[in-house]
Amino acid sequence: MESSSEISPIQSPNQERPSTPTPVTPPPSAVGAAAAAATTTPVETCGTCVNCGGPTTYAPPPPLPTWSPSEISPPPPPTYRPILYPAINVPAETAAQSQQAIILAPVPRSQKVPTLSPPYHFQSPAKRINSPADARRFVDSDSGRNFLGFVVSLSESIRGRKISDPCHESATVSAIISVLDTLLRWIDEIPPAAQSSRYGNLSFRVWHGKMSDHAIDLMLEILPNDDVDGLRSATVELASYFADSFGNSSRIDYGTGHETNFVAWLYCLARLGLIMEEDYQAVVSRVFVKYLGLMRKLQLTYTLEPAGSHGVWGLDDYHFLPFIFGSSQLIDHKYMKPKSIHNEDILENFSNEYMYLSCIVFIRKVKKGSFAEHSPLLDDISGVPSWNKVNSGLLKMYRAEVLEKAPIMQHFLFGWIIKWE
């Protein structure tokens, strides 16, 4: 049979074979350069019959795409818990200067708290800090130096001691613990609302509103019953610091500024003579530990956002002071060193006795992945040779990164007990 009479397997007998093959363009591909080449280059020949070698009406399959490194999908996001507020991008030169300033700064020293005496002139406290210069003005004032000296005194009172060590507990300390227990009970009474958003459970506003509404009554439980000198009128100042110690109800967040307000509230009680120096160990190991447990429960129950977090470049999303007090506990410890935070057995067995270790355990609980990735600053600190150096460095850092920072201290209050000078 002549070749002209042959019929392709895919042609019907009555179908006329096209004299010239029609170029067929393959469908677009989804891969960058390969797709562009496939759609812009015409196909020169059709398919070939396997029997006779003649052209067919089917186009040959398109060539396999060529992958380039730029077209490969990015890696999946990290598995650890994301921080809503990203790390603050500070120029390298500015960061180096700030770090050098902290290193060269003197270590803050403890100071005795001067006790106020009647007649009292309590007033509604107000915000005064509006700029970095205002924040430095407070830190350099007598009020600021004495407040920081109070923090150092609290740190020294717990030096070398465990949380469970016996200590003097006055009636004021017991009353404060009772108040914090009440706030813990209210969390159980106000469960988190069912909502789709990951952060900021709206039930926190209910809890915070109840706490604020009862703040004055809670203060009266701590103040002495006899009001001979008018001391109970201090609630106008005490309630303001107390109500701002547990986060912000509008933003549903919490940070080191609120933590500082709680210590300022304790400082006010010391100024009024209700907390004495012999109470300092109990203030840290009983009161502050109870407060820390309360805040962790609030953070987990109502998913509070970190207020002004520096992301991975911050010490912690929420707290600073437990690292100061906790490092003081471990000074001159015979076995545990800063690098011990990487020892799982130590964390498991001693985190209930040492605040620094409990903070590390909590961070590992809420953040997944490599500790060096989600907490590089704490990982760096673990390389410091002694807890004494860690403690002194954290005190200097607290002054520079908390008390001197206007975004944090802009909400700090000043009245008659803590004066704006």
Image: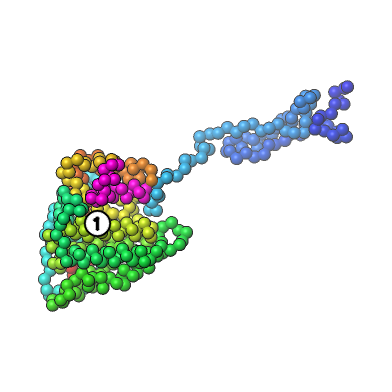
Please, which colouring scheme is shown? rainbow
Looking at the image, residue 196 lies above or below residue 69: below
Question: Of the residues shown, which amino acid type is indicated by label 1?
Answer: Val
Compare residues 238 and 211 and report the one nearer the observer. Answer: 211
**Residue marked by disc 1:** 289
The answer to which quarter of the image holds residue 270 is: bottom left
Quarter occupied by the N terminus: top right
Q: How many marks?
A: 1
Whole-percent x, y for residue 227 in the image: 15, 77
* Residue in the foreground of this view, choosing between 307 and 291: 291
Side (left or right) of 255 relative to 22: left
Q: Is residue 127 in sight in this rendering?
A: no
Q: Main secondary structure of the magenta part?
A: helix
Q: Quadrant of the C terminus?
A: bottom left
Left/right placement of residue 387 relative to residue 24 reads left
**Mark 1, other Cα within 10 Å: few <14 / some 14–19 / many ≥20:** some
Question: In this picture, which residue range is highlighted in magenta?
Answer: 344-367
x and y, in percent, of residue 72 in the image: 52, 37
Q: Residue at x 70, y 31 (%)?
A: 60
The structure residue drawn at horizontal position 16% and vertical position 55%, both measured from the top left corner, is 166
Q: Residue at x 11, y 73 (%)?
A: 118
The answer to whether residue 41 is seen in the rendering is yes
Task: Name the image quarter holding residue 35.
Answer: top right
Place of residue 376 in the rendered image (x, y in percent of width and height, measured from the top left): 31, 43
